[in-house]
Image: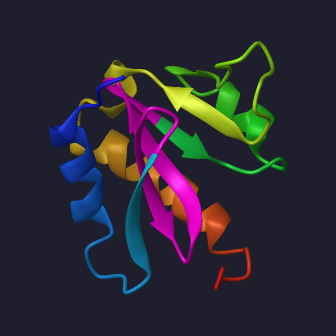
Amino acid sequence: MAYDGALAERVLKLVAGRDDVSERRMFGGWALMLSGHMACGVMGDELLVRVGPETYEDALDLPHARIMDFTGRPMRGFVVVGRPGIADDPGLAAWVKRGAAFVDTLPPKG
């Protein structure tokens, strides 16, 4: 599946000051890795965000967020944010911040 490269670039600009950023092809799209952990990604024109199990239900209550389910088994701790929720820069920044905040609680991967 193709992904929106312009959206990926917008995400990268939001983490430009970090020294632990890498990119990876994942889930048929693009993933932003922070300290070796996926924080968020782009699939098609939507944003995938790793919010963690503790804030998962709260994230699903936010506008334009839904369960991440590609195989018939929901991926608890991850949400998909539809295009309207990330159309403007503040909306995108809030979601990227959520993903970064969760992975920053994890130990870095070697």
Magenta stretch, overall SS: strand
Residue found 76% across the figure and 39% down from its top:
56
Is residue 106 left or right of 10 when viewed as pictured?
A: right
Q: Position of residue 11 (x, y in %)?
A: 30, 53
Residue found 23% across the figure and 32% down from its top:
4
Is 29 or 49 nearer to us in this picture? 29
Most distant residue in the left direction? 6
Q: Is residue 75 above or below residue 33?
A: above
Residue found 66% across the figure and 62% down from its top:
102
Is residue 7 left or right of 67 when viewed as pictured?
A: left
Is 74 or 60 nearer to us in this picture? 74
Q: Quadrant of residue 47?
A: top left
Is 77 or 1 nearer to us in this picture? 1
Is 11 or 93 nearer to us in this picture? 11
Q: Position of residue 33 (x, y in %)?
A: 48, 64
**Scheme by which the image is coloured:** rainbow
Instruction: Please give the range of residues in magenta.
Output: 26-47
Q: Is residue 5 above or below residue 110?
A: above
